Image (cartoon, rainbow, N blue to C red):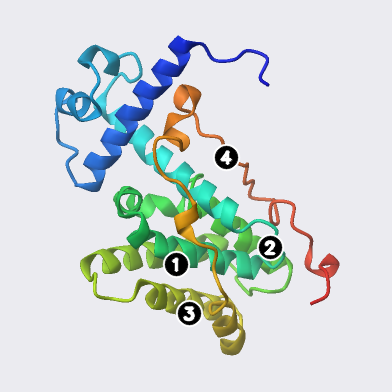
Amino acid sequence: MPEHAPSRLDRRKARTRAALVRAAQALIAEGKTAVAILEITQAADVGLGSFYNHFETKEQLFHAAVEDALDVHGAILDELTTDMDDPAQVFAQSFRLTGRLHRRHPELSKVLLHHGLELATSERGLAPRARRDIEAAVRDGRFTVTDTELAMVTVAGAALGLGHLLHRHPERDDAASTDQVAEDLLRMFGLTAAEAHEICGRPLPGLDAIAIGPDTAASRLGGTPTRRPVPRSDPGRGRRSRGARRSR
C-alpha cells in the first residue's frame, strides 16, 4: 500500500481532470478544437470553475489530452509485446497492433492522428518504442538501417497514412492492409521477403482485452499516467540480446 493513500478530495480532483481530458479527446477526434471552455466543461459535466483548478488555458488541456492518448497507446504496446526477444518482431507487432487500433478504438486513433507528424519525434506512444526496437534490431544485426531518424520518418508517415486510409475507406480490410505495410517496412529495414512475410503472419494478442476508458491514463491520480520508461539506449526493455536468446 502507498505510504500516503489519496484522500477523497484528491480522488474527486482526479476524476474531474479525467473527465475534462476525455471530453477534450472526444472534441479532438471530431475535429472540434475551436470551442469555448464552457462547451468543454459542459461536455465533461463539470463546473466552469473546475476547469481552472486543473488547466490555465484550453490549449493546455488539449495538449494534455493528446499526451494522455499517447500514454494509453504506449501502455497498450508495452502490455502486448511483453516477453518477446526479437526486436524485429517487437517492432512488427507494435506496428501491426497500432494499425488495428484505428478500427477497434477509433476515438483514440483520431486523437493520435490529430497529433500529425509530431508522432515521429514524440517521446510518448509508438515513436520511442519504434526507435528503441529499430536501434536494438540494428545492434542485433536484424536491421540494416543506417539513419534511425530517417527510418522514424518513414515509420511515422506509414502509420499516419495508414490510419487516414482506414478511416476514409471503412470497407478496406484493416488487418490485411496493416500487415502488408508492416511487411514492407521490415523488407525496407533489411529482412528478407520470406522472413518479413512470416513475421507479419504470426498471431497477435487481442486488442479487445485492453480497457480504454475511465480507468486508463487520464484518470490516474493527478492525471499523470504510469508508463514504463523507454530510454533510447534500452535495447528492448530488459529483453535478452540475440546471442543470449533461448534456442527456437
Q: Is label 3 in contact with label 2 (beta carbons under 8 Å)?
A: no
Q: Earlier in the sequence, mark 2 or mark 1?
A: 2
| Category of crowding for the residue at label 2, using alpha-carbon neighbours closer than 10 angstroms: few (below 14), some (14–19), many (at least 20) | some
For badge 2, the amino acid type reads: Met
Q: Is residue 113 above or below residue 52?
A: below
**Identity of the residue drawn at 29% across and 68% down:** 166
Residue 115 spot, x, y in % from top left: 33, 48
For badge 1, the amino acid type reads: Thr
Residue 5 spot, x, y in % from top left: 59, 15
Disc 2: which residue: 84
**Identity of the residue drawn at 27% across and 23% down:** 57
SS for callout 4: loop
Q: Earlier in the sequence, mark 3 or mark 2?
A: 2
Disc 1: which residue: 154
SS for callout 3: helix
Disc 4: which residue: 227
Disc 3: which residue: 184
**Left or right for 32, reference 52:** left
**Identity of the residue drawn at 56% across and 62% down:** 148
Residue 169 spot, x, y in % from top left: 23, 71
Residue 131 quadrant: bottom right
